[in-house]
Image (cartoon, helix red, strand yellow):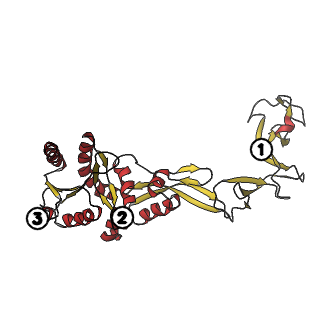
Amino acid sequence: MVDKKMLETSKEKRDEIYRDSRFQLFLNKFLSGELDKLNPVYDPKHGYRYPQVELIMGDPTSTDEFLNRLYEIGFLTRELYDKIIHCPMCNSANVSTIYRCPYCRTFDIKKSSLIEHVSCGYIDSEERFYKKDRLVCPKCGTELTKPDVNYRKAGIWCSCNDCGKSFDIPVPSHYCRECKADFTFEDAKYRNTYSYSLNEAVMKEAGTHYKLVAPVRKFLQKRGFHVESPGFLKGKSGASHIFDIIVSTDETAEELLVIDIVSSPTEDHVSEQSIISMFAKVFDVTPEKACLIAIPKMSENGRKLADLYKIKLIEAEDQNVAVNVLEASLNQASTE
């Protein structure tokens, strides 16, 4: 079912999701192992929430819409976690369940357990059987000492403290502690809450790229750089652009190196389109330096464009070789 959803989602639509900075940060939590399954956290006032996603979204009210969208296009799978009642008036989840008298509707009712004395057949409320700390049958005076042998539970009985009537089943209703509304199940908002997991197809698709980026990111962090991965920069146009890695000497990010990593598992070289795409981003955000790592190598036209656009090009058989080349490049730059 999920794979079918993925197939029905166009490549353009999937690429759009992958470029979404919020999804990139969310995806990174799964790929890094921080998240295996996203479970909701209960908030007495608001109901179930997803704090880790809210931090990414900035606006908590858009979290459910974001997760549902990812589910609908097949990027996430979900399973029912809980059901919860919300007030139909104010939408609060700060709702209590109240049991009412079916005759006068008050909630001032008393619940009692019924006891049956097996040998004589007498049934009454439990408190009627108590004499000090002993159970004694009010009808025949026999002391009851063996549960399920000489006496047994015979159900529940309720009595109303207002109208005095007795009954076996009270009428349930709900009370909103926020807006003070009384309502029944018929009017209640009864909502599903889900836990979410990353679709295996997405995990495999995105995980391949994550494995390319991880060694480079770790190397730069060990060198003492401040690293954001994925990283986002706002350009002169007002648009936000994503890079696989953004490097700065400190958290003020005054001097920036942006890095993108591309690979071509089916071809013997990476297309020059990756250089063109990176240049469009670099032109808008104007970092101090830009580097593109191509695995296993760049096309001839791509090399020419990288030179023209002043994008540092690193070609390597794999990500580990790329780290060695990057290290040599940084060492050379530090001595110049």
Label 3 neighbourhood size at 10 Å, few (<14), some (14-19), many (20+)? some
Amino acid type assigned to the residue bearing label 1 in the image? Ala
State how far apart marks 2 and 3 are (Cα): 31 Å
At x 16%, y 66%, the residue is 272
Q: Which residue is mark 2?
A: 17
For the image, the number of numbered tags is 3
Left or right of 212 on screen, residue 316: left
Pick the quarter of the image with the C terminus: top left
Q: Which residue is mark 1?
A: 154
State whether residue 135 is above or below residue 179: above
| Front position among marks 1 and 2 | 2
Disc 2 secondary structure class: helix
Whole-percent x and y of residue 217?
Answer: 26, 47
Of marks 1 and 2, which one's residue comes earlier in the chain? Answer: 2
Amino acid type assigned to the residue bearing label 3 in the image? Lys
Of marks 2 and 3, which one's residue comes earlier in the chain? Answer: 2
Amino acid type assigned to the residue bearing label 2 in the image? Ile
Pick the quarter of the image with the N terminus: bottom left
Left or right of 80 on screen, residue 211: left
Label 2 neighbourhood size at 10 Å, few (<14), some (14-19), many (20+)? some
At x 25%, y 51%, the residue is 213
| Front position among marks 2 and 3 | 3
**Towards the viewer: 167 or 227:** 227
Whole-percent x and y of residue 152?
Answer: 76, 38
Q: Which residue is mark 3?
A: 304
Label 1 neighbourhood size at 10 Å, few (<14), some (14-19), many (20+)? some
